[in-house]
Image: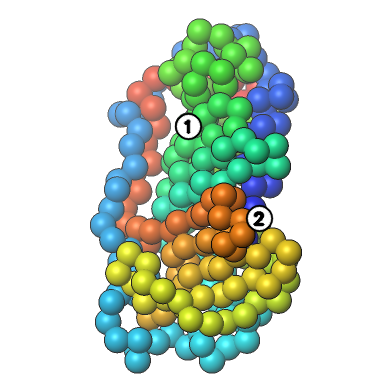
Amino acid sequence: MVRRILPVVAAASLLLAGCASSPSSGSTASGGASSSSAASGGASSASGSSSSPASGNGLRNLSGTDALGKVKAAFSAAPTVHVVLNAKSDQGQAVGYDVRYAKGKGAIGSVNAGTGQIKLIAIGSDVYFTGDAKVLAAFGAAGAAGTWFKTSNASPVGKALAQLTDVNKLADQMFKPSGAIEVGDGKDVDGHHTVGLTDKGPEGGTLYVAAEGEPYPLLIEPPAAKKDQGDAKFSDYGAPVDLTAPAAFRTLPGS
């Protein structure tokens, strides 16, 4: 299940391969609001608590397919959520994904596709990005590490980057199992009772879902034999997410 997120993250690799226009060519200086940040929020406000499992949300009474569908619907409808992924690509490179989503508004976070780190802020149709020296050099902006650039999801660059901040795209990948889903026992995840949805297919893995309240996903773990594949964690459902444009940025030509 963890590896189902990799096709989304792989969009970053395509950008680093040179599909982007050079930010250093004809870009204009622009002003924004204050520096960007994401509110850390509190614990998952609606993902269930350590109360008695007797107040369950009915997942155990559903088939695997129906349970997974209910989880996907709950995740996609959540007003906000924080997703953290640690995995490995097919080439063995470490992949990192740390994004906070605000439904219908945008997202903020960072992605490392194994070829450098990109920081992103999506606000409506606008996408702001920056990166480490390796990333920006691939964009033709050597020496511009730390500089923010603005584009829109209508441009080739913005369209590719927007895939990394699209919660529906993420949900489609994560909740597409490789085999039959078996509903079973969960475990304590950060103080929350859970139900386990295990993918019996070749990619395997178990999705731990809140057993009370909204059936929000909390954790995806690979099978024990593939523990080095990484995991995905979900938290801060309903917590505030601050989407603020960078104080200064350069606009990509044609954006």
Q: Position of residue 155 (x, y in %)?
A: 67, 31
Q: Position of residue 15 (x, y in %)?
A: 67, 28
Q: Quadrant of residue 10?
A: top right
Q: Position of residue 252 (x, y in %)?
A: 59, 20
The number of numbered discs placed on residues in the rendered structure image is 2
Q: Nearer the viewer, residue 60 or 15?
A: 60
Q: Quadrant of the N terminus?
A: bottom right
Q: Nearer the viewer, residue 53 or 161?
A: 53
Q: Is residue 221 left or right of residue 56?
A: right
**Mark 2 is on which residue type?**
Arg
Q: Which mark is residue 4?
A: 2
Disc 2: CA contacts within 10 A as few (<14), some (14-19) or many (>=20): some
Indicate which disc, 2 or 1, sits on the residue closer to the N terminus. Answer: 2
Q: Which residue is mark 1?
A: 119
**Residue 126 makes an appearance in the image:** no
Q: Position of residue 220 (x, y in %)?
A: 52, 62
Residue furthest front in the image: 225
Identify the element where label 2 is drawn. Answer: helix
Residue in the image at 38% along x and 41% along y:
243
Mark 2–mark 1 CB contact (< 8 Å) = no
Q: Quadrant of residue 146?
A: top left
Q: Is residue 16 left or right of residue 242?
A: right
Residue in the image at 57% along x and 62% along y:
224
Q: Quadrant of residue 225?
A: bottom right
Q: Quadrant of the C terminus?
A: top right
For residue 244, above or below residue 208: above
Disc 1: CA contacts within 10 A as few (<14), some (14-19) or many (>=20): some
For residue 205, above or below residue 156: below
Identify the element where label 1 is drawn. Answer: strand
Q: Which one is closest to the eye, mark 2 or mark 1?
A: 2
Q: Nearer the viewer, residue 13 or 31?
A: 13
**Mark 1 is on which residue type?**
Lys
